Image (spheres, grey):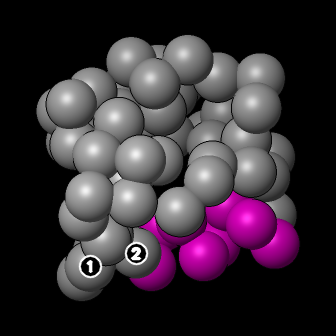
Amino acid sequence: MTLSIAFLTQEEFAQAVAVSPSLVQSWEQKHRRPSGPSLKLLLMFEHHSSLINVLLAL
């Protein structure tokens, strides 16, 4: 899975979705697939990328 939110680092994205940066890296390298709440957040971000700013502000 390639992250569609290119303006964030892996660390920033990981913080926004409450996972480790290494997990985000494994998603990008297709070693693992997101599931559960992480997958739902990723799908929301694909359609509404501004929502990530809301999560980062929390």
Q: Position of residue 10 (x, y in %)?
A: 46, 24
Quadrant where the C terminus is found in the figure = top left
Please give left or right for residue 46 compared with residue 38 in the image. right
In the image, is residue 52 above or below residue 10? below
Find the magenta span and give its range: 40-47
Among the 4 quarters of the image, the one containing residue 27: bottom left
Q: Position of residue 49 (x, y in %)?
A: 78, 52
Which kind of residue does numbered mark 1 sit on? Ser
Residue 10 belongs to the span the image colors magenta: no
Q: Decide: few, some or many residues near mark 2? Use Cα within 10 Å; few <14, some 14-19, many ≥20.
A: few
Please give left or right for residue 31 compared with residue 56 in the image. left
Residue at figure coordinates x 39%, y 60% from the top left: 30
In this view, the residue in front, 57 or 32, is 32
Number of marks in the rendered image: 2
Q: Are marks 2 and 1 in contact (CB under 8 Å)?
A: yes
Q: Which mark is residue 39?
A: 2
Residue 24: tell me if it is visible: no
Residue 26: tell me if it is visible: yes
Q: Secondary structure at mark 2?
A: helix
In the image, is residue 4 above or below residue 47? above
Q: Secondary structure at mark 1?
A: loop
Which kind of residue does numbered mark 2 sit on? Leu
Residue at figure coordinates x 64%, y 72% from the top left: 44
Residue at figure coordinates x 26%, y 79% from the top left: 35
In this view, the residue in front, 15 or 20, is 20
Q: Position of residue 46 (x, y in %)?
A: 74, 66
Our reading of the magenta stretch's main secondary structure is helix
Q: Position of residue 57 (x, y in %)?
A: 53, 25
Residue 43 belongs to the span the image colors magenta: yes
Q: Which residue is mark 1?
A: 35
The residues tagged by marks 2 and 1 sit, at their Cα atoms, a distance apart of 5 Å
